[in-house]
């Protein structure tokens, strides 16, 4: 069963999520962490940076894998997830650069790159704790609602709902890439622990459907119900339809 934490507000959510990551690193200094992007985890990353600066955390042996990346955006593009992760976390803590893994949206051979990504996750022994966000349509990573879902890391077409939601980061909807690389459902569900974060009213419906009891490819986040060690940390607004 998915364990749910409902926090009073975004700050509470960010603190709770950061403390769960901190305890994971404290218990296992060479933890393999799966990270996600989007507005929701920003507070969590800034809390982790703060804890690092206070000498409470050491990322020196940590290995990271990011969930997804836009196809066609180079790592120095301000809307790429490479850029996001460096701006919010990696430029401020001591994860060794060679331990940082993020899918490369400009890889020459995308299929080969995706296969190599899953192999690399397996080679380090799998992910200990995978952080997830949730799309307004229930997507996780960029696994969009569909009649079937991909198991492993792959290139996917973004749905209209996601293009619309993510257009707030771009000058116009036309600039939003139409494709992305995403860790697949099996890549995600193989992690030993999952922590999904959800904040705000716009996520309330997706959260209700995630926990409603029906596991459906139309709500990719509902697959969390099949995981033995999944938690959702949300604020009151995201929990408002439960
Ligand atoms: C994007 C990312 C997801 C993320 C989602 C939610 O589409 N691919 O991994 O979870 O956005 O983002 P936000 O937290 O900004 O709502």
Image: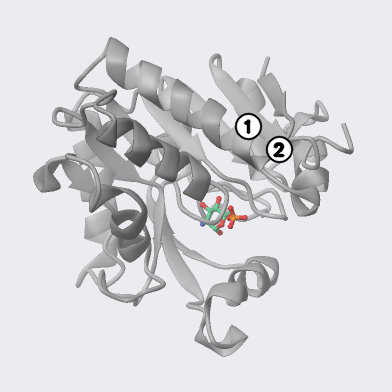
Q: Quadrant of residue 108?
A: bottom left
Relative to residue 207, is residue 80 depicted above or below?
below
Q: How is the image coloured?
A: one colour
- Please tell me whether residue 4 is drawn above or below residue 37 in the rendered image: above
Residue under label 1, please give it. 12
- Residue positioned 12% across, 41% down in the render: 96
Secondary structure beneath dot 1 equals helix
> Dot 2: what SS?
loop
Left or right of 22: which side holds 238? right
150 left or right of 213? left
Q: Specify the quadrant that holds the N terminus.
A: top right
- Which residue matches tag 2? 9
Q: Residue furthest front?
A: 54
Vertically, is 12 above or below 132? above
Tell me the residue at 82%/37% (across/down): 208
Query: What is the crowding at mark 2: few (fewer than 14 residues within 10 Å), some, or many (at least 20)?
Result: some
- Residue 215 image-quadrant placement: top right
Ligand 1 within 8 A of label 2's CB?
A: no
Q: Position of residue 194 (x, y in %)?
A: 50, 27
Residue 29 locus on image (x, y percent): 21, 19
- The quadrant of the rendering that contains the C terminus is top right
């Amino acid at each position: 069963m998915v364990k749910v934490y409902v926090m009073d507000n975004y700050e509470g959510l960010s603190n709770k999520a950061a403390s769960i990551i901190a305890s994971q690193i404290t218990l296992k200094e060479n933890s393999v962490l799966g990270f996600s992007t989007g507005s929701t985890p920003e507070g969590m990353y800034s809390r982790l940076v703060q804890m690092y600066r206070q000498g409470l955390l050491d990322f020196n042996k940590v290995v990271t894998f990011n969930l997804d990346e836009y196809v066609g955006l180079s790592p120095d593009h301000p809307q790429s997830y490479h850029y996001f992760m460096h701006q919010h976390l990696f430029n401020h803590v001591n994860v060794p650069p060679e331990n940082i893994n993020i899918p490369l949206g400009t890889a020459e051979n995308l299929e080969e790159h995706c296969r190599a990504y899953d192999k690399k996750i397996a080679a380090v022994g799998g992910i200990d704790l995978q952080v997830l966000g949730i799309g307004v349509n229930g997507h996780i990573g960029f696994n969009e609602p569909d009649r079937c879902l991909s198991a492993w890391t792959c290139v996917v077409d973004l749905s209209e709902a996601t293009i619309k939601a993510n257009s707030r980061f771009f000058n116009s909807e036309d600039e939003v890439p139409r494709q992305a690389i995403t860790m697949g459902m099996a890549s995600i569900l193989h992690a030993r622990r999952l922590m999904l974060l959800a904040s705000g009213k716009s996520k309330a419906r997706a959260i209700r459907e995630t926990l409603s009891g029906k596991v459906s490819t139309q709500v990719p986040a509902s697959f969390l119900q099949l995981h033995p060690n999944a938690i959702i940390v949300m604020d009151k607004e995201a929990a408002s339809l439960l």
